[in-house]
Amino acid sequence: MEDKIKEEYFTLLKFPTVGADPAHLRDCTACAVWLKDWLAALGFATELLMPEKSFAPPILFAERKGAEGAPAILFYGHYDVQPPDPVEEWKTPPFTPTICGERVYCRGAQDDKGQLFAFLCGMRDFIEEREKAGGASGLPTFKIVLEGQEESGSAALSAMAPEMRRRLAADALLVCDTNAAQDMRPAIVAGLRGVSHFTLRLSGPSRDLHSGAYGGIAPNPAQGMAELVASLHAPDGAIAVEGFAAGLEPPNDDERGKAAEAAPSPEEYTRDIGCEPAGGENGKSIVERNSFMPTIEVNGIHSGYGGPGAKTVIPSEAIAKISMRLVPGQTPRRAFEAVKAHLEARVPRGMKLSIEDWNPGAGGFRLPLASPLFRLAAHVLGEMDARGPVFQWDGASIPVVSILREASGASPLIVGWGQAEDCIHSPNESYSFAQFDKARDWARRILSSLHS
Amino acid sequence: MEDKIKEEYFTLLKFPTVGADPAHLRDCTACAVWLKDWLAALGFATELLMPEKSFAPPILFAERKGAEGAPAILFYGHYDVQPPDPVEEWKTPPFTPTICGERVYCRGAQDDKGQLFAFLCGMRDFIEEREKAGGASGLPTFKIVLEGQEESGSAALSAMAPEMRRRLAADALLVCDTNAAQDMRPAIVAGLRGVSHFTLRLSGPSRDLHSGAYGGIAPNPAQGMAELVASLHAPDGAIAVEGFAAGLEPPNDDERGKAAEAAPSPEEYTRDIGCEPAGGENGKSIVERNSFMPTIEVNGIHSGYGGPGAKTVIPSEAIAKISMRLVPGQTPRRAFEAVKAHLEARVPRGMKLSIEDWNPGAGGFRLPLASPLFRLAAHVLGEMDARGPVFQWDGASIPVVSILREASGASPLIVGWGQAEDCIHSPNESYSFAQFDKARDWARRILSSLHS
């Protein structure tokens, strides 16, 4: 990697862009401005869109007009990152890029600052190459949307996208925010699950109470929340919420077969995650559970004392953070309403449940495998790697991709170069120089092919 | 209250004696030294016992020999306090005694620094009174034990007490760490529940995982802990742990009748706690549930993300803090073993449960209502308040009282002057000057009567 690119990459990583936390709004804004300047230097017309909801980080929209009649290519990425907690588990400071061996350790080193910046570098390579070879007339139109709220649900961009149809209109929607298959075999994402999340707050006594003086008298929200959360699944791990999976569209045999082909084995998962891959519904395959079935996941539960020793209280309230992964046939609203009805019918006596901060997110989608765009991408990826690409139905979500797909009319092409060992969303996230170079090379090659 | 006593009281309150937290060991030691000096000034031989477990706050033992053949009176109190969390709910700094109206607001204003210091002041009044009237020959022997670990289980004193039988030997064991009945009607505690606590740690993946990429694959410890905790109770609120209540001794009719007499109504509880008193087993009376039945209480549950916005992770582990209140017929070990067996039989697939930091505490006890000591106390309390005392079987625990009772051979006499509005263990704990004066007056009067 050239020194200049390494310097730029590290500068980008140093912004602590925790988009979910209003305390980091200033850092997110500074990062967006830095990206704006970077694109402006490459000849883009740039604009920072400041969402009305005042704590949302700005959205960067950039456009570089190409030749008359050339295709328009929309690229989406996000400069926000997951919070670094638990901070004490980081071996290096989470916002100080640190090289160790052939990897860069930093929150966002991969997701998505690393991947998006590698892609932008590949785009710059392509533009410079074409311009050297004969001027701007040979270039497509580029449209770039970089947001700062992906990790917390893309609320602002989701709200604005439908009103930006003309500005977003494009032929292809490129995203570099996913994983390659095992051993870096290229992967085309043929489907994503949707995501939607909310917070549960269960209130009981008006203050924390002495668990001796009031034990047997006052209802306990920590116990009550445990009961509510436990009720979401049956003993066999299946979701126990009536109506949640109504209308769910199962995959076809081609999809199921290709998905199984690309899937790691249970043993590989055990090595990766450090425990038996025992999540989801018993009796279904791992790939089925992750690619084609929905989940209801407790991302956090908090109530009462958690420090050293003991504090014998009945806590006055409990919270839980819940997210749902959705598949085609479900909608965020129907899934949410089903969970809401399930929980509201089970509020333990003496307590009050409030369901807060629902972020609808977006539903999941699956793309047709035989489209011209997929065929072209498969050809390019076959040139990069003789094994050719696998198709994946990622259990993860980029809800805004569903929304941008709709607003832009473009066909999504989602190819990323992450690996499990990057530990995104976990302490000690990292990205290797080899992965960065792949992502950069992919961008240069696919852009050349899309307008050759 | 005399200025001198107010100054001493406030000095005592200012030590942030959170005994459970090793970070406050220095504060606890400073507080114990201050109490040592206070008692030495009153003619006590004093000693700070430094428990072997290095993070345990010191135990203060003080003795003042009385006349030959006079009775020995043992007084027990604790200078440690509950942690002030949640700190943001305090209206005044938790360790700055603040007078508002006729009350002093401070962590420990009542429990137990306020009550123990009021008692010690009453003892000083009595000693000075007797000495003025005719020298030390008319005084009983005083033995005083003040510890700094009551709120976290009295481990050090419990371990040392059996080896201090000779030093502790006494006729009566006085404790001032409980509540009066409604409207400050005096109350004699005729029984206490025991308490025993431990921590659950449920581990799954070796790191926090992306809930999309791994949802349906990795087991979720937050969900698993919710299931474990929920399994401890049946839907009707009864404890669902086999063998937990084996051998439980129900109260006799006299105890049941007297307990009901002193009990607040459900409406009074609703006003006090701010929600319906719906804890414990459906279909049993409040006084039955709080005085004569055991509990298993979740004092805290923590896993994953709890901050603003969302962090869509599968957490790598979950913890829960569990305490049990025990009644006669149960032992801490048998109850703990029953819960342990119950939980270990239910560990969700792919996860590991560890049960840590078990503090056995002590069992509960009930005292015979017709003892000479209770008759004397009832007489003194009748002089202080024409309504006379009620008898209470407190749902709370002072485990060390069981242990000191055994080691000293003394009959316990537990009379305190707390009220629900003192909010002990909650933010904005307070104690009124009127309550302090009652406790002080009680000490002077009962000590006079015990050796008149």
Image (cartoon, coloured by chain):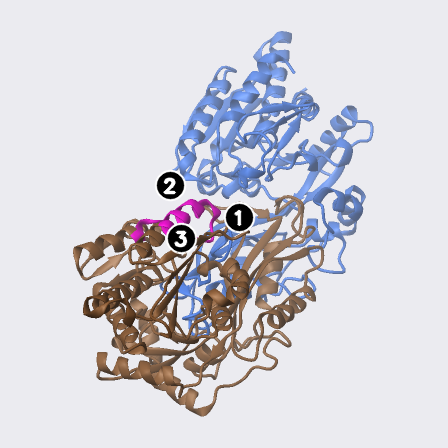
Chain colours: A brown, B blue
The answer to whether dots 2 and 1 both sit on one chain is no
Identified by mark 2, the residue type is: Lys
Question: Which residue position holds label 2?
Answer: B53
Chain under numbered label 2: B
Identified by mark 1, the residue type is: Ser
Quarter of the figure with the N terminus of chain A: bottom left
| Dot in front, 3 or 2 | 3
Secondary structure state at the residue bearing disc 3: loop
Work out which residue is located at the far bottom of the displayed protein and give it. Answer: A253
Residue B378 painted magenta = no
Chain under numbered label 1: A
Identified by mark 3, the residue type is: Asp
Q: Which mark is residue A54?
A: 1
Q: Earlier in the sequence, mark 3 or mark 1?
A: 1
| Dot in front, 3 or 1 | 1
- Rate crowding at label 3 as few (under 14), some (14 to 19) or many (20 or more) other CA atoms within 10 Å: some
Depth check, front residue: A221 or B112: A221
